């Protein structure tokens, strides 16, 4: 600490200098500074003087005059300081000189002020970053130079005399362009002039993100909604985000959830962040199997810290979980219901700051491949990327009606399930008393038959009986004897109700509206085929008034219960953004990947009768309809007769039809195995040997026989079948644990084009077991996965979807649309979907049109293209269905949905084109839309598309140039409508598959005859003959007149 004697003395001149400094406008508050030019002469002592002359009004390169008087040798300083939005008090110009003559006479010196170009010129091709300056000041001062030189004494604070002047600043867009002394090209000059008056607008962006604004059904599966976040486009927000990465990180998540029960596993995901290294990052919220919440954060040193809440969350209630972080403090709050009643709050004080970088990796709601999701629903989810908010400051209410409907549904269903269980238990005990210990004693039998019946406990629901009267009627109508031993009583109860309703459909759909209460009880019992049927009925108006909220409710309930059609429908509606569903590719992908993952698992369940091979059969395709058969049809009997004679093709076809349930044949594993065995052992057909060997290897539907399977696989491989080479590789990998031989056979099969071998090689790379290449190599694995997926391999396609859905590889960006297209194709191959489509087709072939319509509409609403096309065809051929059962324009709706598929069928394009061409009650005439649809059909190679375009040209309708460019028709080569019409008919003829003359051929013949006749009529020969005949006729008439005149005098 300094002594008093050591403190420098403050002179009167120093106080005057400090007062002057206080009068200088602050450089920090530049926006409030008035733009005035003020010259202040401040003479610290009476002999020194400095002032600025000829000072410009604005910031510009100019010459100024400095007038000064020095009483002693001095140094004169001139500088310019400026302030912008991001920096203040920056020196942009400096000038200094020494004057040793001190004659006490005024002296002047000219100083050329030169500003940086970014301060006085506007942006152009060479000057890119003009600065918006808010304040600029010219300063001048002098200091005595005869004192010892110390750098800080040269500053304005120690000046003998000083002055300043404030300059007006010019906004960037009002500044002139700089003459760079460079000649621009004409093109650059034109672009510069067009953009001359373009004003830069800062991007309107907020750190508040609506991660979810629509209910999401979450089952306890490895899937959820994946969200990724990019850098802010706004520079200020991005600067704040980067500053907060490792220092005082701020974030707030607000998540609504509705839990149905505890996590059935160790932990279930609510929300979690996964970084690029596939590690959990900040934040993470998991639900454990005890109903507690696990909160986990990533800290600055790279370590993780986790906490387990002291409270358990309630079920069948809407909960809002708010988690907010600020530096080392994390607050976790749980609120209940729409009223946001406080339930619990915990505050965690951490030992280090939290790391939070949301641009690294992705944030998942629900499950991922690392963790299963919760069993329940997600409501609105808000995320504030740069702010820490209290719960009362968060704007995330639960306002939509659907959330109230979800709560009401499960509250009611809880009561329904309790009633069914209790009723079943009471009735079961009564049945047990009547049937146990069957006696052959004659007198005891008489007593049991005519004596007093055993007393049973009275039903304890007198108050509920009126409220659930329909349920009690159903309970009393059910035969409970076969249900007593059922493992899932509620599911079987709902199944019986649903089947009883569907059995009546063949007689008509009139009763299905009255069956809604029964379907509701079946849905509450957990049989979600009933839930999906209700969803379709409410959304399409099938015998009930249209109710979008109820339709959404039962769609969500069915999807949460893993109903395949409900999952498919929600994925499709979010993919297209139709029927009041928001367009959300991430949510759509979640639903599609859920059912896609179930597809190979469902296919392995060979004994399940509710599955069939998904076939794309149009009702307009007569050839495909003719080969559809049953066990008692002629085609099947003919095929069976050939198989019994030893025809390997017939044996293989019969085995496939029985094994997968194809072409209308019921699934019959036992019959399929007989034909596989017969073809493999007797005929030694390579494909049949391969199929039978795979069945023996897996042992899913027959006892394993590794030795016989290997023998058959080896024989098939020796006959050159690449499928068998892949099978040998599978044998060495699974049974011999020999990756060297496995890789050798898989490589041989891959070289022959086997997609399954490509996937097997990819698995070796993923597991780090490829011979000679130790370590995991995801890049090589992804290459083989892509090849296998292109070959139609389902499991490879699922792996590929996971990569492009999350963008987890650096070279593979996230592409949800591509992931959806692939997931949709796999999901629609699910056996449960195929079973419903097969039921619809069989009903059509059996002339049960009502049943066919119901099954087709169930799959059409789920986005299956073949069902949409067939449904439109049925409405077109049988319009009574559209007018009687459906409230919407059936034909237009389903053809329109069909043409918006990824690969629309040409028949739908042509039909919808006709609807727009003719117009009607539900849509106006639109020739441009009709032209576009016909063109799209023509580009697919459909001759009818070219024919329709030619007809439109003949009617005088002009085809736009851009359509001709798509068709690769040069307008200059076909300037007239006649030549263009002939070109279109010629293309129609070349694309026609008919062996005989097609309509296009007749039209070409007509045009050639018409052209020939026209050329004949217009030739010079015809003109000469006509003139000659006319002359002869005139001459004959003249001669006849003369002869008549000559004969008249003679007669007189």
Image: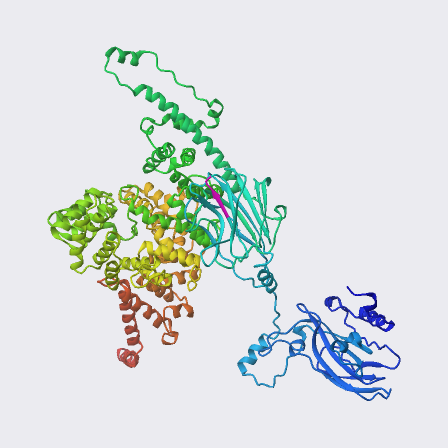
Give the left or right position of residue 793, taking residue 719 as reference.
Answer: right
Left or right, 565 with respect to 353, comes to left
Q: Is residue 421 above or below residue 620?
A: above
Q: Residue at x 35, y 66 (%)?
A: 950
Q: Is residue 724 above or below residue 667?
A: below
**Residue 122: x %, y % from top left:** 64, 76
Nearest the viewer among 66 and 593 is 66
Quadrant in which the N terminus appears: bottom right
Q: Quadrant of residue 96?
A: bottom right
Q: Position of residue 459 (x, y in %)?
A: 43, 21
Q: Is residue 695 above or below residue 185?
A: above
Foreground: 144 or 660?
144
Image: magenta residue range? 285-289
x%, y% of residue 775? 35, 61
Q: Is residue 655 left or right of residue 3?
A: left
What residue occupies the far right of the structure in this picture? Answer: 46
Q: Is residue 288 magenta?
A: yes
């Amino acid at each position: 600490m300094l002594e008093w004697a050591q403190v420098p003395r403050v002179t009167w001149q120093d106080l005057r200098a400090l007062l002057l400094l206080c009068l200088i406008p602050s450089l920090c508050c530049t926006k409030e500074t008035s733009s005035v030019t003020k010259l202040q002469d401040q003479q610290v002592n009476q002999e020194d003087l400095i002032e600025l002359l000829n000072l410009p009004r604005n910031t510009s390169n100019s010459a100024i005059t400095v007038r000064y008087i020095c009483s002693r040798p001095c140094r004169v300083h001139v500088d310019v300081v400026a302030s912008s939005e991001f920096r203040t008090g920056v020196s942009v110009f400096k000038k200094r000189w020494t004057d040793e003559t001190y004659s006490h006479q005024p002296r002047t010196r000219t100083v050329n002020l030169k500003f940086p170009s970014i301060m006085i010129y506007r942006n152009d091709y060479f000057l890119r970053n003009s600065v918006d300056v808010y304040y600029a000041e010219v300063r001048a001062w002098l200091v005595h130079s005869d004192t010892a030189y110390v750098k800080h004494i040269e500053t304005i604070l120690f000046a003998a005399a000083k002055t300043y002047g404030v300059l007006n600043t010019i906004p960037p867009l009002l500044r002139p362009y700089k003459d760079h002394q460079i000649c621009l090209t004409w093109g650059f000059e034109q672009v510069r002039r067009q953009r001359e008056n373009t004003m830069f607008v800062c991007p309107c962006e907020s750190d508040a993100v609506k991660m979810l604004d629509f209910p999401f059904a979450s089952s306890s599966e490895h899937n959820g909604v994946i969200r990724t976040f990019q850098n802010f486009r706004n520079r200020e927000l991005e600067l704040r985000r980067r500053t907060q990465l490792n220092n005082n990180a701020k974030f707030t998540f607000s998540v609504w959830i509705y839990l149905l029960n505890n996590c059935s596993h160790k932990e279930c995901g609510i929300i979690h962040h996964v970084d690029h290294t596939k590690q959990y990052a900040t934040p993470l919220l998991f639900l454990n199997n005890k109903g507690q919440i696990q909160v986990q954060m990533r800290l600055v040193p790279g370590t993780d810290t986790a906490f387990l809440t002291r409270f358990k969350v309630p079920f069948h209630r809407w909960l809002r979980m708010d988690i907010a972080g600020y530096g080392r403090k994390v607050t976790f709050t749980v609120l209940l219901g729409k009223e946001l009643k406080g339930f619990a709050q915990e505050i965690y004080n951490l030992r280090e700051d939290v790391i939070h970088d949301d641009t690294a990796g992705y944030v998942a709601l629900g499950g991922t491949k690392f963790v299963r999701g919760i069993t329940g629903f997600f409501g609105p989810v808000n995320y504030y990327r740069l702010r820490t908010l209290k719960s009362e400051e968060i704007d995330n209410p639960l306002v939509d009606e659907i959330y109230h409907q979800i709560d009401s549904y499960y509250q009611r269903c809880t009561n329904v399930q309790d009633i069914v269980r209790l009723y079943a238990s009471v009735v079961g005990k009564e049945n047990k008393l009547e049937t146990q210990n069957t006696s052959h004693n004659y007198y005891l039998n008489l007593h049991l038959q005519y004596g007093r019946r055993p007393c049973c406990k009275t039903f304890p629901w007198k108050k509920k009986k009126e409220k659930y009267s329909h349920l009690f009627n159903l309970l009393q109508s059910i035969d409970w004897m076969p249900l007593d031993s059922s493992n899932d009583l509620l599911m079987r109860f709902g199944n019986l109700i649903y089947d009883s309703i569907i059995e009546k459909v063949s007689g008509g759909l009139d009763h299905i509206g009255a069956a809604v209460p029964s379907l509701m009880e079946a849905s509450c019992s957990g049989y979600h085929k009933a839930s999906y049927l209700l969803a379709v009925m409410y959304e399409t108006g099938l015998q009930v008034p249209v109710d979008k909220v109820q339709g959404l409710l039962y769609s969500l309930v069915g999807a949460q219960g893993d109903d395949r059609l409900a999952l498919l429908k929600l994925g499709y509606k979010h993919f297209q953004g139709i029927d009041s569903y928001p367009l959300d590719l991430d949510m759509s992908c979640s639903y599609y990947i859920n059912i896609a993952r179930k597809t190979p698992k469902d296919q392995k369940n060979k004994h399940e009768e509710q599955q069939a091979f998904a076939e794309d059969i149009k009702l307009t395709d007569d050839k495909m309809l003719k080969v559809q058969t049953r066990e008692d049809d002629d085609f099947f009997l003919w095929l069976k007769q050939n198989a019994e004679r030893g025809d390997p093709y017939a044996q293989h076809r019969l085995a496939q039809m029985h094994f997968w349930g194809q072409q209308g044949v019921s699934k019959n594993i036992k019959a399929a195995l007989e034909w596989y065995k017969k073809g493999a052992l007797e005929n030694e057909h390579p494909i049949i040997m391969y199929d039978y060997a795979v069945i023996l290897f897996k042992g899913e539907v027959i006892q394993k026989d590794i030795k016989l399977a290997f023998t058959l696989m080896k024989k098939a491989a020796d006959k050159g079948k690449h499928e068998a080479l892949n099978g040998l590789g599978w044998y060495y990998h699974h049974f011999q644990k020999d990756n060297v031989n496995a890789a050798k056979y898989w490589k041989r099969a891959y070289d022959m084009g086997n997609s399954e071998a490509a996937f097997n090689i990819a698995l070796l790379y993923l597991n780090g077991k490829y011979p000679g290449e130790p370590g995991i190599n995801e890049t090589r694995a992804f290459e083989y996965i892509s090849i296998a997926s292109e070959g139609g391999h389902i499991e490879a396609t699922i792996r590929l979807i996971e990569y492009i859905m999350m963008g987890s590889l650096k070279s593979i960006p996230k592409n949800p649309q591509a992931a959806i297209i692939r997931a949709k194709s796999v999901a629609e191959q699910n056996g449960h979907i195929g079973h419903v489509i097969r039921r619809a087709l069989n009903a059509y072939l059996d002339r049960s049109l009502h049943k066919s319509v119901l099954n087709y509409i169930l799959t059409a609403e789920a986005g299956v293209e073949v069902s949409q096309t067939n449904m439109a065809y049925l409405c077109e051929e049988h319009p009574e269905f559209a007018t009687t059962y459906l409230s919407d324009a059936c034909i237009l709706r389903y053809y329109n949905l069909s043409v918006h598929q990824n690969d629309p069928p040409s028949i739908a394009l042509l039909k919808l084109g006709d609807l727009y061409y003719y117009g009607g009650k539900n849509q106006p005439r639109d020739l441009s839309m009709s032209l576009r649809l016909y063109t799209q059909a023509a580009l697919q190679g459909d001759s009818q598309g070219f024919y329709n375009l030619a007809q439109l040209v003949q009617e005088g309708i002009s085809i736009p140039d851009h359509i001709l460019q798509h068709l690769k028709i040069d307008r200059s080569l076909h300037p007239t409508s006649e030549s263009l019409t002939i070109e279109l008919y010629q293309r129609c003829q070349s694309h026609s598959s008919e062996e005989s003359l097609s309509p296009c051929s007749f039209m070409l013949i007509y045009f050639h005859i018409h052209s020939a006749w026209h050329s004949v009529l217009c030739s010079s020969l015809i003109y000469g003959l006509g003139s000659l005949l006319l002359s002869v006729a005139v001459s004959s008439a003249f001669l006849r007149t003369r002869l008549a005149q000559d004969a008249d005098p003679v007669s007189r």
